[in-house]
Image (tube, coloured by chain):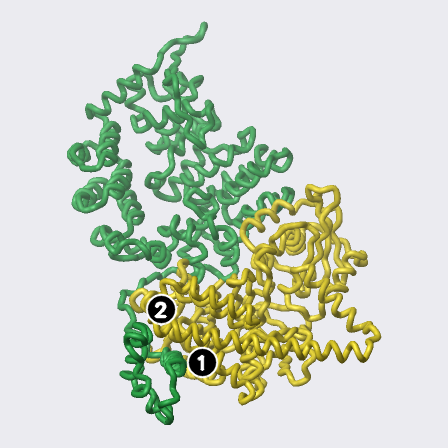
Chain colours: A green, B yellow
Amino acid sequence: MTSIDDAAAEALKRSFLLGTTRNPAPIGAALKAVISEQGSATELAALALIGQRMRFLRHDAPPAPNTRSPIDDPRKIVPDAARPLMRRLVAAQDGSASDVAALALADACNRLRLRPHPFDLPRLATFIRAHGDSLGADAAAWAERNDDHEKRPRHYFDADTIDAGNWTTARPAARVEFIAAMRGCEPDRARELVEASFAEDAAPIRARLLDALGRGLSHADIPFLESLAKDRAPTVRERAQQLLKFIPGTAAAEGHIRDLVARTRIATAGVLRRRATLTLELPANLPVVPPALPTEAGRRWAVNEYAGVGLDAMAAAFGLPVVDMIAAAAEDAPLLALFARQASIESRFDVLAAIVREHAIDAWIDAVGSEGGARELPDDTTIEQWCAAALAPGLWPAPPPPAHLNRLYVFLRRPLPLAQARELLGSRAFATIANAAWSAEILGPLCLAIAALTPHSLRSELRRAFTALPANEISRALVLLDCLAFLDPASDQECAP
Amino acid sequence: MAIEIEKVEALAPDQASLAAAAKLKKPNLWPLLACDAAGLIWGECQGSGASPYRVICSEADFGYKCTCPSRKFPCKHTLALMWMRADGVLPFKTEAAPAWVGDWVARRRPGAGPARKVAADTEVKASAARAAVVEPAAEDPKSAAAAAAQRERNKADREAAIRSGLDELDTWIADALQGGLAAFMPAASERCRKIARRLVDAKATGLAGLVEGLPADLLALPESMRGDALIERLATLYLIACAYRNQDRLPGPVKADVRQTVGWTVTRDALLADPDALRVRDRWMVVGTVVDVQADKLRRIETWLSRLGEGTGPRFAVLLDFVPVSLGKTANMYSIGEVLTAELVYFNSPAPLRAVIAEQIGSAIAGERWPRPTDGVLGAIARLNDVLALRPWASDIPFAAHGARIVASGASLWLTDARGMAGLPVRVDEDDVVLPLVEVDDIDAFGTWDGHFLSLALCETPLGRWIAS
C-alpha cells in the first residue's frame, strides 16, 4: 500500500469544498493506491483518509524568515530580582507617563544603563509606551513595533552615540535631548542643526525642537524664529512667537514687558522707612489648572503668562534693582512666583535662594515650572545648585501635597541631592507624616513621591521610617524602594553637597 | 510551604480582586487570624453583615474556602488572608483548629486537584459518596440484581442511542460534503448547533461538544486555513464514529479512549479504583496552564505537567478540571514552574495523557529549571505524528523540543530548529507575548500542538524562563 499523491488529494479536497453533488469526488482515482477494494470506498471514507493525511502533512518546512537589522542595545538587562517588583509596580494600567513611580523606575534604568528584560516587555506595555525613551533601544523598538513603517525612526541607538551627523535619524525624544544639551554649550550650532532639518519633521516634533531651543535665546535666533511666522502648524507659529517674547529688544518682548508693568500696581509703604511695593492685578476669572490648588491659581497664571521675561528687564521696567524688586513684591505671591520661576530659568540661584528663604518657603513649587518641556537643568551640578537654592525642607511646616512633589521629581528627573534629602528626612514636615492621621489617598502618593526623591544611600533609612506607616496604604512606595535597591545596588550618582 | 506574594497574584482571578483584597489587609477587619502546625491558616473577616466571613486556606496546596457569597474564586477575603500571611506583618496566632476548620478539612478529598476544591457543593457530594462507601447499607440481593439488570438495560439503551446518533452524524457530514464545505462555513454555527443537540439527545455528549466547538475553532483560524481545517475536523468526527461502531475490534486502550471521546465518562473514583490503570509516581513540573470557557458553559481548567524523573512511561500529563461558568471567575491553583511530587493515574488511552492526582506528597515548590527535552525540533515533530498514529482524534498534543528558535516570517511566527529546516507555526495573541522570543537562540520549548498552531507555554532560554501567562 502506498500513499495518496498530492494531485489526487487536491482533487478530493476541491470536490469536498465545492460540493460532491456538482463536483463528484474522484474517489476511485484518489484512493486506488491505498484501498484495494475501491468499490467499497465512500465519500466519508475518503474524507477520513484525506483529513488524516492533511494532519500528518501539516508539519512542513517553515517559510523564509524576515530579514531585518537587529537592534543593538548595549544596555544590561535589569537584575532578575528586580523583575517581579517591576511587574508589580508598573504592569497592567500602571506605569503611565504621569506616574511618578514609573518615571523614577525609567530614570533609574536610564541612569544605570539598564533595560527591561525582553520577556517582560509585553507585560509592561503601558510603561514601555510611556517611557520607551529611557529604557533603551530594545524597549523603544518594542513600543513602536505596531506603528506605521513611515513613522518609525530609521535607527534605534543609544543616546551616547548621537552626534550632529546622525541626530536626525534618532527617536524624537533623543533628538530633543540632544538639541537641548547642545544648546547649553553651542547655542548657534544647535539652532543651525534644527534649522537645517526643520521642514522635514512633523509638527509635534518641530514644536518640541523649538522647546529645546528655549534655553540660551539670543538675537541670533531672531531671523529663524521670525521665519516661522509662516509655518504651516499653528502650534509651531505660537511657540515661535512665544520664544520671540523672551528675547530682549524684540518688539514682542517689549510689548510683553509693557503688559506686565501695566498690570502691576506700584506703590509705597512704610512710615519711617518708605519702600516700594508691587502688586500684580490678576484677571477676574482665573483658570485653575490641576494639580495647582485654587489658591495657587494666581501664581500659576503669573508664571505661565510672564515667565521668560528676564529679571533684569523686569527690574529695569519697574525702575528697581532686582533685590529691591523682589522685596517690593514680598506680599504678592503671584509676583514672587514669577520671580522664582524666572530666577530658575536664568540659573540665578542666589536670587532664588533669597526668595525662598526670605519671602516664600514654597516658591520652589513655582520655580519648577510646567511639565513636559526639555529638561531645564542640564547636569547634576546645576541640579544640586538649584536644589540647594530652592529647597529648604527643614523649614517646611508640613509635607507638600503629593502632586507638587511629583512635579519636583519630573523637574529634576533624579533623586534629591544628599543634603536636601537628608534635611527632608529629618524635617518636621516629614515627622508629621508618621504622626498625623492621613487618608490613604494622600499618604500613598506622598510616600511614593518621597521614595522617588530619596537617593540610594538614604533609602534604607526611609524604609525604616516607613515601617511606622500602614504597609498596605504605602505598598507602592515600598515596592519602589525595593525595586530601586535591586536596580541600584551601589550607585555612584549621588554627589555630596 | 510559605505563601509568596507572587503566588497570591497568580491565584487572583483578576486585578480587581487583588485591589479589593489589598483594602482588606487591615488588622481591625480581622478579629481572628490563626494558623496551625499542619499548614492551615484561617481567619474571620468582618464584612458588611452581622457575622464575619470565615476564611480557611491550606498552605500546602492552596486549597481554600470562604463563607462569603462572592462568585469569584478565590474571593477577596481568601486573597487578603493569603496576602497577609505572605506579608508576614500581621501575627497569626498558633492554635488548635476550631470545629469549622476541622469540618472543612474533613470534607476535602485526599489528593484532590485544586480547582475541584472551589465548589463547596461538589465537596459535599463527594463527602456523601465517601460516607456511603464507609458504611454500606445492607442490600437486598433481589433488589441488587434488579438494579444491576436495570443498569445493563440503561447501558444497552444508551449504546443504541449513541449508534443512532452516530448514524445521524454520518448523514449530516455527507450532506455537508454534497452541498460543499465552502457553502457550509457561513452557516456553520447553526448547523453545528442542530446536530450537537441531536448528539446530546443521543447521549453522545463528548462528540456533541466537539461538534459545538467546531465553528469557534474555525473562526479562530486565518480564513485561508478554514477550509482545510473543516475537512480535518469532519474527517476526525467520522473517524471517531467509525471507531466507536467497530470498538469491539479495537485494542483495549483505543476502545476505552474512543468511548470517552464519544461521551462515556470514567469517574475519578472508578479510575482510582481501577487496578489496571497506569500509575506514575514521580516529580512533576507544571509547564502550562490554560483556562478556557467551553460551549457548554463550563470553564475548562487545564494543568499541563512534565515529568522530571527519568523512568519509562508518559512524559506528560494533563489535569482537567471543570467549573461552571456561573460560579464566577476561577483561577488555576497551580502556577507554571511549580514542582510537585505526586502519583498520577492516567485515563486509559493508547497515548496516555489525561490523568488525575491520586496522591500528592508535600507541597508544590517553585524555582527549579525545566529539564532539557531529549528531542530536537525534528524529533519532537516526529513524536506528534507518533501520537496521531496512536490516537488519530487527538486534539492538543504536548510538544517539547530543545535547541529551538522562534523566527518571524511575514506576520507569523514559527518555531524552528537551529538551521530553520523544520518548524511549526506558533500561535500569537494580541499582546505579542511570544515576540520577545524572536532571535533568542537555543530555546527549550514546551507547548501544545492543536493541529494548526503551536501554543507555547514555557520556554527555558539563555535569557531565563519565559512563560505565556
Foreground residue among B454 and B227: B227
On screen, residue B396 above or below A439: below
Horizontal arrangement in the rendering, residue A321 relative to residue A210 (left or right): right
Chain letter of mark 1 equals B
Q: Which residue is mark 1?
A: B384
Q: Quadrant of residue A442?
A: top right
Separation of marks 2 and 1 at Cα, in angstroms:
21 Å
x and y percent of residue A357 in the render? Answer: 47, 26
Chain letter of mark 2 equals B
Q: Of all residues shown, which one is farthest toward the top?
A: A271
| Crowd band around label 2 with a 10 angstrom C-alpha radius: few (<14), some (14–19), many (20+) | some
On screen, residue A478 above or below B386: above
Foreground residue among B459 and A313: B459
Q: Residue at x 31, y 80 (%)?
A: A25
- The amino acid type of the residue labelled 2 equals Arg
x and y percent of residue A28 in the render? Answer: 32, 87
| Comes first in the chain, label 2 or label 1 | 2
Horizontal arrangement in the rendering, residue A250 relative to residue A115 (left or right): left
Of helix, strand and loop, which one carries label 1? Answer: helix
Residue at mark 2 shares a chain with residue at mark 1: yes
Q: Which residue is mark 2?
A: B226
| Residue B466 seen | no
Horizontal arrangement in the rendering, residue A253 relative to residue B401 (left or right): left
On screen, residue A494 above or below A57: above
Residue mark closest to the camera, 2 vs 1? 2
Which quadrant of the rendered structure holds the N terminus of chain A?
bottom left
Q: Quadrant of residue A152?
A: bottom left
